[in-house]
Image: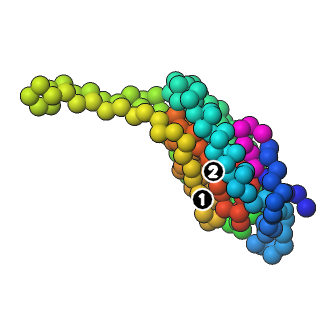
Amino acid sequence: MNTIGHYIDGQAHADSNRAQPVFNPALGEPVRQVAMASRATVEQAITAAEAAFPAWRRTPPLKRARILFAYKALLDKHAERIVAAIVEEHGKVWEDAQGELQRGIEVVEYACGAPEFLKGEHSREVGPEIDSWSEFPPLGVVAGITPFNFPSMVPMWMFPMAIACGNCFILKPSEKDPRRR
């Protein structure tokens, strides 16, 4: 049976410590299994994200947005495959899975506007000899733990905005429907 592993630092990473089945709820049968991350695997993901952060935070927002535009194009190109994966692992009907993917794509589209919303603001003399400004620096390594009920949409609510803003992101999807989206 095919095992879904982990993707760390641009590489597939198998963690054979333990695995559990992933079921197709419509059939009640296992369709693959997912490797459960060991502490060492989680630490490896954190270390890789920390190492990538200095260069990523220095990447101009326009370049980050271009990467997200390319990601959106891939989502559009492979939409049927993604929807089929949601249907198989989650058990949603096709139309619900399509709607879920579309809501996620909308956030990716919004994140593509990062060069505009990361500009910050400056107001002169908001008080006597007081200027005010805002800046939006990256925070660092951030993580998202997502539920089983929206396996595509909820992760896309998280990571596109995080990476558009210059952060590195670690995703822990639900073990019930874990396939990479």
Disc 2: which residue: 171
Residue under numbered circle 1: 146
Q: Is 63 placed left or right of 95 in the picture?
A: left
Along the horizontal axis of the image, is 41 left or right of 166?
A: right
Q: Secondary structure at mark 2?
A: strand
Instruction: Tell me whether the residue at label 2 lies in contact with that at label 1, contact meaning CB atoms closer than 8 angstroms.
Output: yes
Q: Residue at x 81, y 64 (%)?
A: 19
Q: Position of residue 130 (x, y in %)?
A: 15, 28
Which residue occupies the foreground of this view, 101 or 145?
145
In the figure, is residue 107 to the left or right of 43? Answer: left
Please report the bounds of the magenta region as a residue range.
6-11
- Residue positioned 74% across, 45% down in the render: 7
What residue is at 53 percent from the left and 30 percent from the top?
57
Dot 2 amino acid type:
Leu
Say few, some or many: other residues with alpha carbon within 10 Å of mark 2 (under 14 / 14 to 19 / 20 or more).
some
Other-residue count near label 1 (Cα within 10 Å), few / some / many at <14 / 14–19 / ≥20: some
